Amino acid sequence: MEAALKLTALGLTAALLALVVKKQSPELALALSLCACALGAGLLLKGIVPVLNLARSLADRAELEGSLTAPLWKCLGLGLLTELAASVCADAGQSALAKLVELGGGLLCLVVSLPLLQAVLALIEELI
């Protein structure tokens, strides 16, 4: 709960400052937004450790191999990172670049998930 309050305060403060600064210096407003995103990501990284530990514990109990769960975590990370990058690009007025980043993130998720797809296909072949 404390992290949520800090993140909210950081976001609102940075948004207000960027709004004030944007009229005189759009580049500085963008840099301020990027710094706020980096700080916010740092706050979020602290809170994700228990979630990762729980997921690892559940995967161990289900006797899932790391090669099966790794693509899921990579896709999740890629999705979050691409969404943030695309939002920053859109805020900078580069909507075409934002769409390209989103498209690239989706494509990279497909590439990362290929080993998982191959494992599923091998399982189907084994069952047939």
Image (tube, helix red, strand yellow):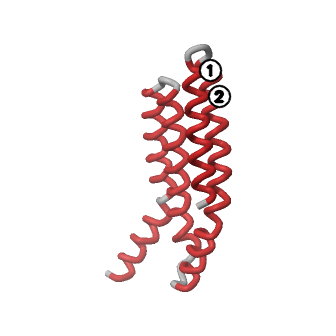
Q: Residue at (60%, 49%) from the top-left corner?
A: 7
Q: Which mark is residue 67?
A: none
Q: Residue at (55%, 58%) from the top-left corner?
A: 74
Residue contact at pointers 2 and 1, CB within 8 angstroms? yes
- What crowding class fits label 2: few (fewer than 14 Cα within 10 Å), some (14-19), or many (20 or more)? few
Residue closest to the eye, 102 or 91 = 91
Q: Mark 1 points at which residue?
A: 27
> Cα distance, mark 2 to mark 1?
6 Å
Mark 2, secondary structure of its residue: helix
Q: In this view, does 21 lie above or below 67?
A: above
Q: Quadrant of residue 57?
A: bottom right
User: How far from the left and from the top, in percent, is residue 92?
Assistant: 52, 25
- What crowding class fits label 1: few (fewer than 14 Cα within 10 Å), some (14-19), or many (20 or more)? few
Q: Residue 31 carries which label?
A: 2
Q: Residue at (43%, 65%) from the top-left corner?
A: 117
The amino acid pointed to by label 1 is: Glu
Residue closest to the far top: 24
Q: Is residue 59 above or below residue 48?
A: below
The amino acid pointed to by label 2 is: Ala
